[in-house]
Amino acid sequence: MRSTATVSPGPGVAALVLSWIITLYTLWQMVQMHEMVPGRRFDRYHELGQYAFGEKLGLYIVVPQQLVVEVGANIVYMVTGGKSLKKFHDTVCLSCKKLKTTYFILIFASVHFVLSHLPNFNSISGVSLTAAVMSVSYSTIAWGASVDKGVQPGVQYSYKSSSTAGKVFNFFSALGDVAFAYAGHNIILEIQATIPSTPEQPSKGPMWRGVIFAYIIVAFCYFPAALIGYWMFGNSVDEDILITLEKPKWLIAMANIFVVIHFIGGYQIYAMPVFDMIETVLVKKLHFKPSRMLRFVARTAYVAFTMFVAITIPFFGPLLSFFGGFASAPTTYFLPCIIWLIIYKPKKFSLSWWANWVCIILGVLLMILAPIGGLRQIIIKAKTYKFYS
């Protein structure tokens, strides 16, 4: 789970549910296409794109989008991990000196300077499992503590902005938040590649069962936290509901540590494909000699880059919105559908044909509108933000 940010009723709930359905459908497509060619497995998103669009065009279409998603996710995780650490510190030590958010992002990043040198997905399976458990835990704490706190006096359910333009742009931004929440498509083929597969027992069977289980957990995490959070706090709730909640202190502190652990695992899951891309380019394109030193320098430099951007622009909500629309929408909402139409060529006006075209149209609209709202919020916050505070 990326965020416990809340949504308003009506359009917000519709966007949350519709996105859950669309992305589950496109995930099913990705799982099915992993072994659609007998004797061959598409272990990377760009390999699937190359098969559909051609060797060069497939790379140009898929790799930049996938890279932006993964790098964007890592930057957002840096920001959120640091802010959650700060919330934990401020909650358990009220008399302590208040430290800058920058310092907590540095602490969060220091963990990744170590973990990033693990070799592959299998080596971080324990970290990934722990992250998943933490996600369920802090989400449950978030909505459980909200219910315990009750509906706040004077709660308002109107839009935060009073102007029509503000309401529209905020809605665009919220769409980006939702899109970012379902960005797992970028690594689904890499994960499926770790599952043994034979003609008698293809990997798509256990993979799809895993996806269904994961999406049930996603629904359990997102929907109660978003809906109950808004019900209890209205439009005064923070981007992360755990920031809004204050008591009981021990429970809120524990929830924030769970968030930190979750984002440690999440960062590594999204960083692994980036490491693979960087090292491939360095060795095959720039002709560096493969070595431990090359690997160490490349991965350390990447972690340092995401840390620097997170420290410079620590705007959790706007970053979520911008990357959610600009990057997650193509690779999650409509690119799998385009590839499906090219490869399987469903009959025109059939159910499959209509389903894919509806997803494509909605995804393109999301890609255009959500970044506008996110970028506007970044500009507004930057006007009053003191850098490295």
Image (tube, rainbow, N blue to C red):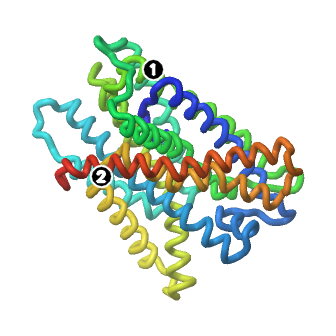
Q: Residue 110 location in percent, x, y?
A: 31, 57
Residue type pointed to by label 1: Ile
Is 154 left, or right, of 63 in this rendering? left
Q: Residues within 10 Å of mark 1 (few under 14, many from 20)?
A: many
What residue is rendered at 22% in x and 37% in y? 89
Q: Which of the two discs, 1 and 2, sits closer to the camera?
A: 2
Q: Nearer the viewer, residue 353 or 186?
A: 353
Q: Which mark is residue 332?
A: none
Residue type pointed to by label 2: Ile
- Which quadrant of the figure has residue 61? bottom right
Secondary structure under badge 1?
helix
Q: Which residue is mark 2?
A: 379
Q: Which residue is mark 1?
A: 228
Residue located farthest toward the front when viewing the structure as drawn: 164
Q: Residues within 10 Å of mark 2 (few under 14, many from 20)?
A: few
Q: Residue 364 location in percent, x, y?
A: 60, 52
What residue is rendered at 69% in x and 54% in y? 336
Is 280 left, or right, of 347 in this rendering? left
Q: Nearer the viewer, residue 44 or 56?
A: 56
Q: Nearer the viewer, residue 255 or 14?
A: 14
Q: Residue 48 location in percent, x, y?
A: 71, 64
Q: CA distance from mark 1 to mark 2?
A: 30 Å
Is 154 left, or right, of 23 in this rendering? left
Q: Tell me, yes or no, whether the two marked residues, 1 and 2, touch with CB atoms within 8 Å.
A: no
Q: Nearer the viewer, residue 144 or 107?
A: 144
Of marks 1 and 2, which one's residue comes earlier in the chain? 1
Is 346 left, or right, of 269 in this rendering? right
